[in-house]
Image (tube, helix red, strand yellow):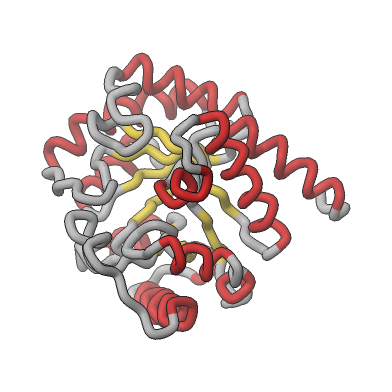
């Protein structure tokens, strides 16, 4: 899953793909580099970020989705990264085929009904707090156990609303209301999430905890570190990897699959 932020303030690529032309060019390049999904978002969710209105999100993402959908002609899925059902609905109408909701349906009670009605995949992510305050003082008694229980609860709610099991994707939410220690505990126990009976997604790309571990913000170094966790994730049964640097992670994934004799 390639990350395409159509925002001025995302933590890593904010402002790089604001125009329809540059965003579509980047989306096409991601698919050429091996992305199966392009995840398009019009609202930054970095720590301390502020909410963006339905209207502003749609202004940012809908033209890109329309153009990219036409350009890709079904070569890859297009995901809309939003917590608001009205944005998701407009995106699906424009050509998106998947919803990525970091609030796991908590911000908008209509999200599950929309996903059920359209019969599209829905990513449910764990986050303690909200982007504005999630990193102020995150605490857990047992981070893996608590996130597992939360994701299962949200998956059950989605199924009760009519979302099919095969369309539910669980994301433990690395960096969303977690300290470095919490993130590493999750990454050491990825099999605890991949064995829950749902598809799973992992997003570590260029995140602050990697910068802390490496003591570097250099993108090439962060790409290598991200690819390392992609390899670990594959061995742990994770199916989807949300990344900025698609080519490096695709190459890593292909090598790991080959070594495991997985086609």
In the depicted view, which residue is nearer to us: 211 or 31? 211
Residue located farthest toward the front when viewing the structure as drawn: 215
In the depicted view, which residue is nearer to us: 56 or 260? 260
- Please state the horizontal and vertical placement of residue 115, each as a whole percent of the image: 36, 59
Query: Is residue 156 visible to us here?
Result: no
Residue at position x 14%, y 43% from top?
52
Residue at position x 34%, y 34% from top?
5
Q: How many marks?
A: 0
Which image quadrant for residue 24?
Answer: top left
- Please state the horizontal and vertical placement of residue 214, each as a whole percent of the image: 52, 44
- Please state the horizontal and vertical placement of residue 194, each as a whole percent of the image: 61, 69
Residue at position x 52%, y 64% from top?
184
Q: Determine whether, in the image, residue 146 is placed left or right of residue 132.
A: right
- Please state the horizontal and vertical placement of residue 50, each as a whole percent of the image: 14, 47
Q: Is residue 66 above or below residue 35?
A: above
Which image quadrant for residue 133?
Answer: bottom left
């Amino acid at each position: 899953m390639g990350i395409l932020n159509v925002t001025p303030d995302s933590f890593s690529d904010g402002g790089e793909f604001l125009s329809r032309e540059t965003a579509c060019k980047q989306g096409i390049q991601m698919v050429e580099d091996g992305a199966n999904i392009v995840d398009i978002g019009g609202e930054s969710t970095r720590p301390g970020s502020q909410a963006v209105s339905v209207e502003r999100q749609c202004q940012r993402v809908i033209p890109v989705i329309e153009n990219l959908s036409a350009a890709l002609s079904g070569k890859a899925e297009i995901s809309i990264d939003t917590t608001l059902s009205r944005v998701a609905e407009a995106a699906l109408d424009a050509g998106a085929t998947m919803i990525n909701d970091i609030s796991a349906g908590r911000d908008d009670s209509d999200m599950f009904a929309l996903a059920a009605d359209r019969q599209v995949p829905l990513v449910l992510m764990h986050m303690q707090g909200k982007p504005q305050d999630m990193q102020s003082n995150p605490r857990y008694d047992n981070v893996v156990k608590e996130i597992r229980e939360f994701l299962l609860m949200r998956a059950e709610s989605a199924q009760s609303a009519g979302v099919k099991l095969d369309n539910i994707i669980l994301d433990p939410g690395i960096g969303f209301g977690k300290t470095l220690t919490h993130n590493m505990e999750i990454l050491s126990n990825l099999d605890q999430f991949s064995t829950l009976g749902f598809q799973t997604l992992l997003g570590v790309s260029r995140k602050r905890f990697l910068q802390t571990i490496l003591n570097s913000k250099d993108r090439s170094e962060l790409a290598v570190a991200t690819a390392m966790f992609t390899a670990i994730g594959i061995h742990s049964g994770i199916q989807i990897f949300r990344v900025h640097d698609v080519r490096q992670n695709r190459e890593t994934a292909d090598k790991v699959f080959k070594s495991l004799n997985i086609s």
